[in-house]
Image (tube, rainbow, N blue to C red):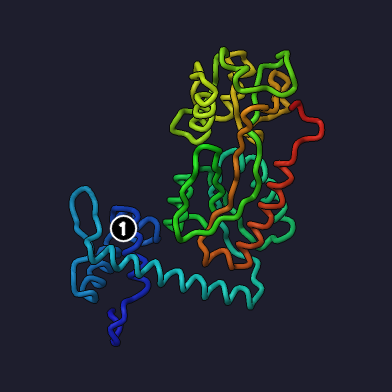
Amino acid sequence: MANGDGLLDVGRLRLLREVGLRGTIAGAARSLGLTSSAVSQQLAVLEREAGTALVDRSPRGVVLTGAGHALVRRADEVLDVLASARADLDRIAGSLSGPVRIAAVASAAATFVSAAACELRESHPGIALSVLVAEPARSLDLLLAGDVDIAVVDEYDRVPLALPEFVLARELCAEPLVAVLPGGHLGRRAVRLADLADADWIMPPDDAACGLAVRSACRAEGFEPRVRWETDDMLLLARAVAAGHGVAVLPRLSVDTRAAAIQTRRLGEPQLQRRLRAVARASALSRPVIEAVVGALAGRAAEAAAPARRGRW
């Protein structure tokens, strides 16, 4: 029911926001744990409260009207204020429990995110951590939609990553990209990119940040890499190198340096880096439970990014 004082209902504002994000009544219903008919009914109530149409319905879905967009912008502000209030209460209570959802790039998930999850399971058993592997663009979309609390994203030299205004980012670590070569490859300890100009290449696609960064660096060195294998599956990239199909330049954390059939070498010129960041809404970062998770991620990331004492690069 509408509030007697004319105020809009926060629950219905959240519902409108979900409809705008998901693009369908059914999608919003799934995200909120409601039926489609319940969402439609609550939208109708909100439109009566607002005194204007907030969505345009069609067989293909729903889109927000101009008034709907304006109201969703205000809904974001209201929900952020409520999240900040929740954070204040958590700090007062010293709460270190509850669910925390992370979306992370695969190489981070397999290494320091996994290690941090093990650490938190022992040190803070009240934290229920869940991890979803996703590329940065999707992770940020999930963060925007409220489907995750933290996004672990990466950014490469030559390929800047744009972050939404409503988030804060903490750098977890910076790591080098390394040359990944078949086992038994002879040569100097450090490899210049130009040394690989005549090689066959194994590479992520150019619409992936790593693939674009490496291609851009190769072009700056005066050659176009001859790509024979292309995939965004980092495990397959390393296996293709091990099988002798070519060479690759990849972030060190994405390469299992224990594999006998490959070796990694430090890049001399040009040196390339990848930076890994934990991204969250500003209102969420002040919650003790989120601070604890980000702290564990930062500690384990720093350990993982430190050059291995007995590595092959």
Say what amino acid the circle numbered 1 marks. Gly
Q: Residue at x 58, y 19 (%)?
A: 240
**Is 125 left, or right, of 25 in this rendering?**
right
**Is 201 left, or right, of 300 in this rendering?**
left
Q: Residue furthest bottom?
A: 5
Query: Which of these two is toward me, 235 or 179?
Result: 179
Residue assigned mark 1: 20
- Which image quadrant: the N terminus? bottom left
**Is 133 left, or right, of 301 in this rendering?**
left
Res 155 quadrant in image: top right
Q: Residue furthest right?
A: 310
Query: Which of these two is toward me, 34 or 45?
Result: 45
Where does residue 9 sit, x and y in percent of width and height?
Answer: 33, 76
Where does residue 38 sit, x and y in percent of width and height?
Answer: 29, 65
Tally of numbered tags: 1
Where does residue 109 sit, x and y in percent of width and height?
Answer: 61, 43
When the figure is inspected, residue 229 is found, relative to residue 156, above or below; the finding is: above
Circle 1 crowding by C-alpha within 10 Å: few under 14, some 14–19, many from 20: many
Report helix, strand or loop for mark 1: helix
Q: Residue at x 74, y 27 (%)?
A: 313
Q: Residue at x 53, y 49 (%)?
A: 103
Where does residue 65 sit, x and y in percent of width and height?
Answer: 22, 61
Query: Which of these two is toward me, 260 or 306?
Result: 306
When the figure is inspected, residue 151 is found, relative to residue 220, above or below; the finding is: below
Query: Which of these two is toward me, 302 or 149?
Result: 302
**Is 180 left, or right, of 36 in this rendering?**
right
